[in-house]
Amino acid sequence: MALDFIIRCEAVAKSYWRGTLEIPVLQGLDLEIPRGGYYALMGPSGSGKTTLLNLIAGIDRPTGGSIEVCGYDLNDLDDDQLAGWRSQHVGFIFQNYNLVPVLNAFENVELPLLLTRLSRRERREKVLEALALVNLTDRLENYPRQLSGGQEQRVAIARAIVTEPDILVADEPTGALDAKNAEEVMALLERLNSEVGKTILLVTHDPKAAHHARIQIHLEKGVLDRTVEVNR
Amino acid sequence: MRYIHLILRSLFRSRRRTILTVLFLAVSVFLVATLQSILLTLDAFANNPNSSNRIAVRHKVSLTNLLPLRYADWIRQQPEVEEVMALQWFGGIYQDPRNFFPNFAAEPEPIVRIFKEEIVEYSETQWRDFLRDRNGCIVGEALAKKYGWKVGDVIPMQGTIFPINPRLNLRLIYRSRRLTDEQAMYFHFKLVEEGVPFMQGRVGNLWVRAKHPDEVPRLIERIDRHFADAVEPTLSETENAFQLEFLKMMGNLATIIHAITGAVLVAILIVTANTMAMAIRERTTEVAVFRAMGFTGSRMLGILMAEGILLAIMGGMAGLGLAWLAAGGIRAALGSVIPWLTDFTIPVDTLLFCLHASMGLGILSTFIPAYRVVRRPIVEGLRAL
Ligand SMILES: Nc1ncnc2c1ncn2[C@@H]1O[C@H](COP(=O)(O)OP(=O)(O)OP(=O)(O)O)[C@@H](O)[C@H]1O
Ligand SMILES: [Mg+2]
């Protein structure tokens, strides 16, 4: 029985060059993540977690191997096609939230919908829906600087899910939060996975955060060296 | 247009910087618009299409040497000539030297035929009164209004070049198509000729009207050739050229104005380029976030360019608004001193030039920083914190 893999990495390699010196980061990495999976990517600093996440999210290109996500071989798409693909299939959650400071919560969440054909009213409905999911319907008019870090990250999560992407990528989403807010954000991601069925790829240092995932994968010296199923 | 909200918000991200830039642009554009308008106004004055039939004949040596009046007789016999008139700049003063307006002594009958494009509307009865009265004069309506003159008033004029002080009876007030043309006074040349011994049979200029503008160059050439070997040789030129000679007394205005315009445009470019470069550089991460969300490079470029162009246009419009307000002030303050500024406005040409220039500068100053930030790899932009 073939599992429905939404992410499929085959012999993925990525090197950086400092002058003529090649710095290999990923060296022939294989990874398959099934639809609806919740994976935590762990490993020491500099091991290439962010690099791998960026490759899978289609904002960087591998130097070797192939990456198939949501049925598309990313090597086959040019930059503009890749942008269109991201707008439909990927939601980004960053460590620093990266909200637009001059837009309020509602407008920030609406941003990715500007790329769709939706009317103003349809966009409004979707934004309210997303903000309801993160429990922030009472903060529509607030600007990022008027929100707490945890609230900012929840707005950012609403922005990431508003287009109903298949996968969510989150690079250290709790890195800038205190324990209580981190716990809240992690609970939210868990709910998005179990209730809405989003595939989530999470990069984290924090074992507590990683514990929310179903599967932990460890990156070491450019390859995955260990896969651990989380027992709950 | 779904991005207009985003663009406006981004533009006023740093309110003080944006407002200062807009103010700087406004002042610069105001300066350029006003100077260019003055230039165009003077130019229009010296290139009056109405005067394309007219030739000014003067002494070859200088504007102040006199010609024999009888030259008019020979010129009148030329087949291309419609009318000839003796015209003398009188340069008289009314009450106070600051009350400047052009006043001429002219052979009376031809005045309305020579200047038929300027002296458009008048009463035939008043015209006959003027011809009959040796001390009569005619003035434009704008001039009459300015000093509150009515037909029948006595206007005492004080000679400056000529030692006579004629008391003129206002016989006729004419109207023109443009206010600029209603600033002049004409009276009988005989007053000067008979009152001033050295003016006997002599005059400063002969004003000639050709039947057709095409014949003007040929006529100019023939007149000057005919009198070339006379004791008093002539120099004929189109009325426009003659006016220009007059205006040249103001120095090489055009060159100065164009130089200032150029310098100001360069300054605008530097300031907007700096503002936009700062505004865009501090958003490197934000641009990368937008692109990660699926905004293409060209869409981002468009959004950033729109911001720069909008900034420049806001400055340009504010500057034109200032210039428009100032034009009213210039008309009021200088129109009476410098007659060709009576109609002073910001011409449509200048308006369009300033709008295009600001838009062009907006594009020019935004493109390079916008292009650079958009071309940067997304992952680098995300890391640039
Ligand atoms: N643009 C680049 N040029 C050169 N080297 C790079 C570049 N980006 C990343 N690297 C190198 O690649 C390696 C992996 O980087 P990456 O950011 O993926 O690590 P990471 O696992 O996310 O680390 P951290 O836990 O600290 O975030 C590092 O050694 C880093 O120095
Ligand atoms: Mg990292």
Image: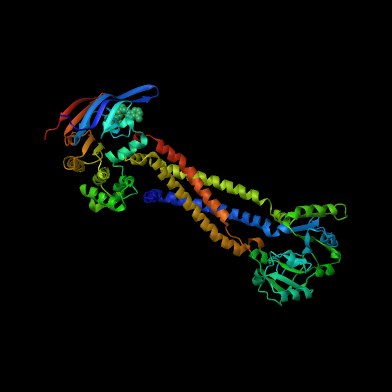
- In the rendered image, the quadrant that contains the C terminus of chain A is top left
**Left or right: A88 in relation to B324:** left
Q: Is residue B60 in view?
A: no
Q: How is the image coloured?
A: rainbow
Q: Is residue A31 above or below residue B231?
A: above
**Left or right: B239 in relation to A194:** right
The residue nearer to you, when weighing A222 against A55, is A55
Farthest residue to the top: give it.
A21
Image quarter for residue A54? top left
- In the rendered image, the quadrant that contains the N terminus of chain A is top left
Total of numbered circles in the picture?
A: 0
Q: Residue, x 57% and y 60% (percent of image)?
A: B327
Q: Position of residue B134 (x, y in %)?
A: 79, 74
The residue nearer to you, when weighing A181 against A157, is A157
Image quarter for residue B184? bottom right
**Left or right: A196 in relation to A106:** left
The residue nearer to you, when weighing B380 against B52, is B52
Q: Position of residue B15 (x, y in %)?
A: 41, 51
Farthest residue to the left: give it.
A232
Q: Position of residue B170 (x, y in %)?
A: 72, 74
Q: Is residue B322 above or below residue A84?
A: below
Q: Residue, x 63% and y 57% (percent of image)?
A: B41
Q: Position of residue A31 (x, y in %)?
A: 23, 28
Farthest residue to the front: give it.
B79
The residue nearer to you, when weighing B266 against B95, is B266
Ligand 1 in which quarter: top left
Q: Is residue A74 above or below residue B112?
A: above
Q: Is residue A127 in view?
A: yes
